[in-house]
Amino acid sequence: MDEIWPRLSALGLNAVLAPVYWEMIEPEEGRFDFSLVDALLKRARAHDQRLVLLWFGSWKNSMSSYAPAWAKRDAARFPRAETKDGTRQEILSPFSEANLDADRKALVALMTHLAEVDAKHRTVVMVQVENEIGMIPEARDHSPRAGSARQRLLRLRRARRDRIQSALDRIH
């Protein structure tokens, strides 16, 4: 990418959108390596560019391609989304507390690192958290855990609708 930086400035650009993958910063659980992030910061500063970082944690383009191998290998701890017929997909379930906690720890570690190394320079102007988290070929996770969460949501929505209707009936 070294040859690209001067061309960005020549085009009059002042910011670069760059991905940061969960697997890139946490190759082993609990061990973070920010060397590639730091190199990106250094190059951006050297060319007077700002960075918009795009965090690819658990999902990207409907897959869990950028989750670390240690999470992808442990389907018991990090369950997969399921299709309607119960087929497990290579997509981490959004209803897994373990997945949420692990992804959150990695994102917090990244943000903490950025605060420590970039507070003075302010090279990073924005971090977009997750991107394109939909699922293909199914539109959602159909696992039992997802089904339970969906039923709870539907009950809450019906109760809210009933309360609103009751209030409207009292008004009229």
Image: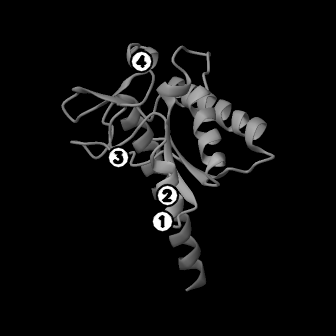
Give the Cα separation between the discs numbered 1 and 4: 38 Å
Give the Cα separation between the discs numbered 3 and 2: 32 Å
Q: Which residue is at 41% across, 36% downward?
A: 148
Query: What is the secondary structure assignment of the residue under circle 1?
Result: loop
Are the two marked residues, 1 and 3, in contact with CB atoms closer than 8 angstroms?
Answer: no
Which mark's residue is nearer the viewer, 1 or 4? 1
Q: Which mark is residue 70?
A: none
The crowd level at tag 1 (other Cα within 10 Å; few <14, some 14-19, many 20+) is few
Query: What is the secondary structure assignment of the residue under circle 2?
Result: helix
Examine the rendering and report whether any part of residue 77 can be seen: no
Are the two marked residues, 1 and 2, in contact with CB atoms closer than 8 angstroms?
Answer: yes
Which mark's residue is nearer the viewer, 1 or 3? 1
Give the Cα separation between the discs numbered 2 and 4: 34 Å
Q: Which residue is at 54% across, 60% downward?
A: 9
Horizontal and vertical percent for residue 146? 39, 36
The crowd level at tag 2 (other Cα within 10 Å; few <14, some 14-19, many 20+) is some
| Residue under label 3 | 134
Which mark's residue is nearer the viewer, 3 or 2? 2
Query: What is the secondary structure assignment of the residue under circle 3?
Result: loop
| Residue under label 1 | 11
Q: For the C terminus, which image quadrant?
A: bottom right
